[in-house]
Image: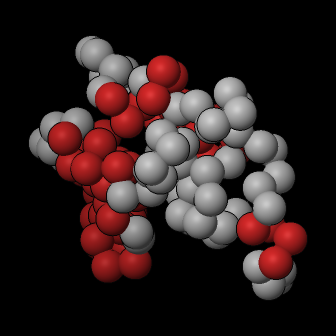
Amino acid sequence: MKLDMTGQERAAGFMRSKARPLERACHAFHFGNAGRDPVLNALATYQNADGGFGRGLEPDLTLPDSSALCTTRARASGRRRRFSHRPNCLDRKHQRHQAGAFQQMPPALLILPHG
């Protein structure tokens, strides 16, 4: 489906007013004149000390701990945006849990409320 100019303006207005900072940065990267730094800065707010990603990066998985799902989404985000080099926040060597890999189901998932 192709949006006409009015539809594009409405979509951009919605992104500016309702989207999270990460999605706003991604929208500006793809449809505006923004570079990659705002995307990386927004993405970095979801990174944990262990190098993985969590903190609600995936809206359906809001637990704070790093998870394989959120870390995979962060890495895919960098690939989709075709960044010329991989920043530290997306570098696989920075994304290792103490045991060598992220748990698919972090322990916090069991104690957090479910929708």
| 40 vs 4: above or below | above
Residue at the spot x=51%, y=22% of the render?
A: 92
Q: Quadrant of the C terminus?
A: bottom right
Does residue 95 show up?
Answer: yes
Colour pattern: secondary structure
Numbered disc total: 0
The x and y percentages for residue 86 are 34, 21
Q: Quadrant of residue 20?
A: bottom left
Residue in the image at 26% along x and 50% along y: 41
Depth check: give the residue in front, 16 or 64: 64
- The extreme front residue here reads 98
Who's the residue at 29% across and 43% down the image?
40
Horizontal placement of 59 versus 93: left or right?
right
**Horizontal relation, residue 99 to residue 28: left or right:** right
Q: Nearer the viewer, residue 23 or 74?
A: 74
Asked if one can make out residue 10 in the rendered structure from this viewpoint, the answer is no
Q: Left or right of 53: which side holds 31?
A: left
110 in relation to 41, above or below: below
The x and y percentages for residue 11 are 38, 65
Q: Residue 8: x percent and y percent?
A: 34, 58
Name the residue nearer the viewer: 77 or 66.
66
Q: Residue furthest top?
A: 84
Residue 66, compared with residue 115, is above or below; it is above
Q: Residue at x 45, y 29 (%)?
A: 94
